[in-house]
Image (spheres, helix red, strand yellow):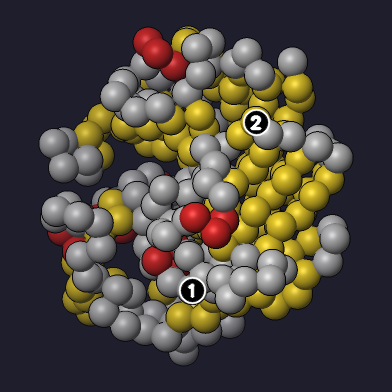
Amino acid sequence: MTGSSTPMFELHAGALRLALRPDLGGCIAGLWHGDTPVLRSVEPAALTASRPSACYPLLPYSNRLGYRKFRWKGHDYTTAANFGDSPHSVHGVGWLRPWEIVSSSVLEVVLRYRHEGDADWPFAFEATQYFTLTPQSMSVQVVFTNTAEVSHPVGLGWHPYFPKRARSRLHIELSDRWDSDATQLPTRKVAQPGIDSDVSHLSFDNCFEGWTGPARIRDEKFSLQLSSSLDHLVVFTPQDKDYFCVEPVSHVSNAIHMADPAAHGLRTLAGGESFEAWMKLDIAVL
């Protein structure tokens, strides 16, 4: 912990430094190798929200929940606006709520968020993130437990941001891409045999299926390998930003509105059941 009143924690391993802001959506403020950011990074004391951070958790769903309403087990529910002027709810609730530090050591930090059903998400749950750092890698695990008395839908993921450098390049093995409408809801699935290109040549804001093997991210500073227990990816490569995103997620965006949500990765957890996922970033300096 630091000496300030702002809740933050750092892990150090070799030249790597991982800074967390539990109070800002359980987010990673920054990940550096020496003075060079591995993820898009902000000194933790300077961060004021989770969205400009290095990475934040996506739960209990990833990406868009269409038009802030859904029907589940014969009941209609609504969710609140939480993302600018978007007509949809976005990224769940975990990234917008304070988490608490459950335990910490030189090897691991454990954060927890307890949710009671509210206007943003009607069902109660508890989520715990476990952060670990070695001189060559960062790992995050999440355990999501349904603490409601009824079953409810669950999706998980993370939203890491990578600095866009002069020679940033992506190599990812995939099978399919979801094209979207103007509001970013998926509309149709098309074949996408993979991504292998300089980031500057890409213009994606899509969810992908059939992710196998690590996503390889390489530039003049680092060779990174992003792996996860989750098998979907959202790839966002805005042409006008100095970052890009490669997001491991459990389900297709807006899967809750599809004819068979389970077929598109959305889980159903009974009361007391848990869903675990992990993400790992291996880091080699060039």
Alpha carbon separation for disc pair 2 and 1: 28 Å
Indicate whether 42 appears above or below 48. above
Residue pointed to by mark 1: 98
The kind of secondary structure element at disc 1 is: loop
Q: Is residue 53 above or below residue 189?
A: below
Nearer the N terminus, badge 2 or badge 1? Answer: 2
The quarter of the rendered structure image containing the N terminus is bottom right
Picture layout, residue 168 above or below residue 100: above
Q: Which is nearer the eye, 80 or 76?
A: 80
Position of the C terminus, as image quadrant, is top right
Residue denoted by label 2: 36
Left or right, 244 with reference to 121: right
Instruction: Decide which of 223, 16 is in the foreground and name it.
Output: 16
Relative to the observer, which residue lies in front, 82 or 13?
13
Residue 24 rendering spot, x and y as whole percentages: 48, 65
Q: Residue at x 76, y 55 (%)?
A: 11
Q: Is residue 110 visible?
A: no
Please state if 221 lies on the left or on the right of 89 as rendered: right
Q: In what element is the residue under mark 2?
A: strand
**Residue appearing at x 14%, y 53% in the figure:** 85
Q: Amino acid at mark 2?
A: Thr
Give amino acid for label 1: Pro
Q: Is residue 69 left or right of residue 125?
A: left
Residue 180 % position (x, y): 22, 34
